[in-house]
Amino acid sequence: MIELIVKDWLAQKLAAPVCLEVPAGPPASFVVVEKTGSGRKDHIASATLAVQSYADTLYKAALLNEEVKAAMDRLPEHPAVSAARLNSDYPFNDTAAKRRRYQAVYDVTYHENAAP
């Protein structure tokens, strides 16, 4: 699963915890990796991933987002990943939970039979 590959990659590169969903009793800052879409052609898989950076202020969320983008830009160093392209990033506050966050959306091309 590409989500696990990216989660593990970011966990190695970032000081903030990286999760696949918002944890119960979340820390002040953390990152969530979510797959929003996928496709496949000739055994080459692609996915759109939303990487959300949470923090206690919007400024800190923006700084964490910059760290996420730097790590994601290096994702093709992983042997299972061919490309990671930033689609967009923007402030994306969680108004229901009243949490500050940024979201970076990446288009990732990878080998579909790759293990995390």
Image (spheres, rainbow, N blue to C red):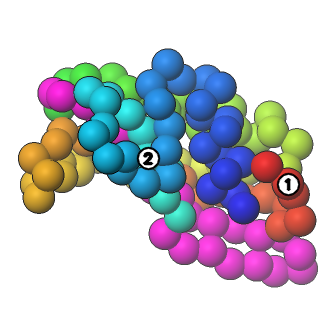
Tell me if 61 is positioned left or right of 105 in this view. Answer: left
- Residue 5 is labelled as none
Quick one: quadrant of the N terminus? bottom right
Q: Which residues are magenta?
A: 36-57
Q: Residues within 10 Å of mark 2 (few under 14, many from 20)?
A: many
- Taking 53 as reference, is 84 above or below it? below
Q: Secondary structure at mark 1?
A: loop
- CB atoms at circles 2 and 1 under 8 Å apart? no
Q: Which residue is mark 2?
A: 32
Residue 24 picture location, percent across and down: 32, 47
Q: Does 3 lie within the magenta span?
A: no
Residue 4 picture location, percent across and down: 67, 51
Q: Which residue is mark 1?
A: 115
Q: Secondary structure at mark 2?
A: strand
The foreground one among 68 and 42 is 68
Question: At 62% across and 74% down in the image, what residue appears?
Answer: 38
The overriding secondary structure of the stretch rendered in magenta is strand
